[in-house]
Image: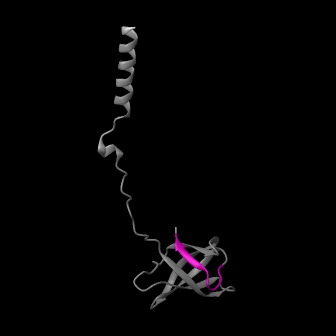
Amino acid sequence: MRCLLYLMLGAGVVLAAGCAQPNAARAKPTPIVMPDTTLVGKVVSVNTTLRFAVLNFPVGRMAQVGQVLNVYRNDLKVGEVKVSGPQRDDNIVADISTGEAQAGDEVKDR
C-alpha cells in the first residue's frame, strides 16, 4: 500500500513538472509588421497594333527601364509588359510581351 502511494505521488510530481512552463514561454510572440514595397501602377492607354502600353505610377515610385511587370485585371494575371521608356512625369511606356493589357488594368512587379 505504501509503495502504491509513493508511486502515485511520484507520477503526480512528474506530470506537474511537465506542465510547468516559464512565463517567457507562455507569452505570445509579437507580430512583425513589414511595409508593402510592391511597385503598383495603372495602365493608362494601350496601342494594340504596336503592342505597347502607357503606365502611370504614384509620385516617387517609378518602374525602371528593362523591368518586367505583370498585368492584372480583376486580380487575375492577364499579361506581362517590359518597361522600355520613354518616361514623362509619372508615365512611362512598356512593351506588351505576353498576354494583353487594357486601360484600367493594374501592373505590379513580381
Q: Is residue 54 left or right of residue 51?
A: left
- Residue 107 among magenta residues: yes
Eyeballing the image, is 76 above or below 51? above
Residue nearest the observer in this picture, 32 or 89: 32
Question: Residue 91, position in %: x, y?
Answer: 50, 88
Q: Quadrant of residue 31?
A: bottom left
Q: Is residue 53 left or right of residue 2?
A: right
Residue drawn at x 34%, y 24% is 13
Q: Quadrant of residue 48?
A: bottom right
Question: Residue 67, position in %: x, y?
Answer: 49, 73
Q: Quadrant of the N terminus?
A: top left
Q: Quadrant of residue 95?
A: bottom right
Question: Residue 103, position in %: x, y?
Answer: 63, 86
- Residue 57 among magenta residues: no
Residue nearest the observer in this picture, 98 or 4: 4
Residue drawn at x 58%, y 78% is 106
Question: Residue 17, position in %: x, y?
Answer: 34, 29
Query: Which range is magenta?
Result: 101-109
Q: Is residue 20 left or right of residue 83?
A: left
